[in-house]
């Protein structure tokens, strides 16, 4: 049972961190479909830097710098060039997927996965007995828990958080009240870039400690779905991300229980099938309650 819980947490952590990034963006009024691209960019840069320098700190710093730059570009395109936020987000994800695949060949001379000599620290690696499985969790899993509390406190208990929410719920009223909406959106996207750098680093330098083409496998889109399922709230988003982690772990465990007779394609499909079902059920419940859907395009920009 302990191993299964650890597998759930390991599968959920990158989705969890990216979902928090999407939550900040959507709180500010930006629908962020570029989470996938930021995750894969962070994963590649972190792995390449770790291989070249042998330093986890430099790997994480490099991933953060790259993602902050991409997030700034995202903001410039949708703010000053008035580009469609949905298209820019998808463009970012598709471009990053292709660029990292190409960079994998250019930098390392192979399309195969590249192995990192170092991985993320595991703060509980010294545990023994029933708690020993927790030793496989990286430091970023525990960081996700802390960051969820920080997100809840900052949004619910600070003036900046309330202004950020106002930028998304009614940007015209926020501007009338003197709130610099564009600056708050920039801040939200920069926070998102930072969190996606953590998500990408967790994906590539925890557990497998390697980078391969299409390493994210749609986890960024699962993170976006978690934002919708969690009603753009820190706790709800985190629970949704853990739910997807459970679905992924269940698929892996099912493969083991059936001794490989279960088609591996089913295991890969399971989280996405669960996503479709969960979103559909949530939409029906909200419709019966007379609530507005979470995704409101008119409020984005």
Image (spheres, helix red, strand yellow):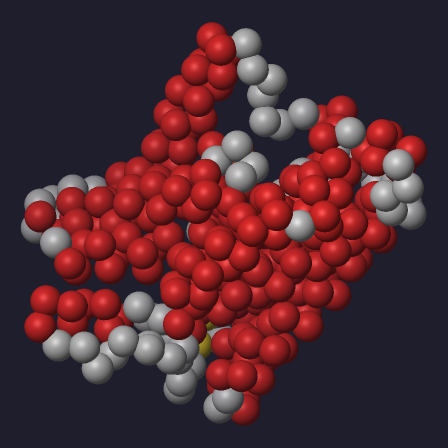
In the depicted structure, whether residue 169 falls above or below residue 254: above
Identify the image quadrant of residue 179. Answer: top right
Q: Quadrant of the N terminus?
A: bottom left
Toward the viewer: 185 or 112?
185
Q: In the picture provided, is 182 more to the left or to the right than 270?
A: right
Residue 130: percent from left, percent from top: 10, 67
Q: Quadrant of the C terminus?
A: top right
Q: Which x, y percent locates residue 185?
A: 77, 48
Estimate the x, y position of residue 155 in percent, counting from the top left.
62, 46
Tell me if residue 208 comes above or below residue 301 in the rendering. Answer: below
Q: How many marks?
A: 0
Q: Can residue 29 be seen here? A: no
Is 110 in front, or is 137? 137
> Would you say residue 16 is visible in this rendering?
yes
Q: Is residue 44 left or right of residue 82?
A: left
Q: Is residue 285 left or right of residue 297?
A: left
Query: Which residue is at a point 70% across and 42% down the rendered structure image?
Result: 162
């Amino acid at each position: 049972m302990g191993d299964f819980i650890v597998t759930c947490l390991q599968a959920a952590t990158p989705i969890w961190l990216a979902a928090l990034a999407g939550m900040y963006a959507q709180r500010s009024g930006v629908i962020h479909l570029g989470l996938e691209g930021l995750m894969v960019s962070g994963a590649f840069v972190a792995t390449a830097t770790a291989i070249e320098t042998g330093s986890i700190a430099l790997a994480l710093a490099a991933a953060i710098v790259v993602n902050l730059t991409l997030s700034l570009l995202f903001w410039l395109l949708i703010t000053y060039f008035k580009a469609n936020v949905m298209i820019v987000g998808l463009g970012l994800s598709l471009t990053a997927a292709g660029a990292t695949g190409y960079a994998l060949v250019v930098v390392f001379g192979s399309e195969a996965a590249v192995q990192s000599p170092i991985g993320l620290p595991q703060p509980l690696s010294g545990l023994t007995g029933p708690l020993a499985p927790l030793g496989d969790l990286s430091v970023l899993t525990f960081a996700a828990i802390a960051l969820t509390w920080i997100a809840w406190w900052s949004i619910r208990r600070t003036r900046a958080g309330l202004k950020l929410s106002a930028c998304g719920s009614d940007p015209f009223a926020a501007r009338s009240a003197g709130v610099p909406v564009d600056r708050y959106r920039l801040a939200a996207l920069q926070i998102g870039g930072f969190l996606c750098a953590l998500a990408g680093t967790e994906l590539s330098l925890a557990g497998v400690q390697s980078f391969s083409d299409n390493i994210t496998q749609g986890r960024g889109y699962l993170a976006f779905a978690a934002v919708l399922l969690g009603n753009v709230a820190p706790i709800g988003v985190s629970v949704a991300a853990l739910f997807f982690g459970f679905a992924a772990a269940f698929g892996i465990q099912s493969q083991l229980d059936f001794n490989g007779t279960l088609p591996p394609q089913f295991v890969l499909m399971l989280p996405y099938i669960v996503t479709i079902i969960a979103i559909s059920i949530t939409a029906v419940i909200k419709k019966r309650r007379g609530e507005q859907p979470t995704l409101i395009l008119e409020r984005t920009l």
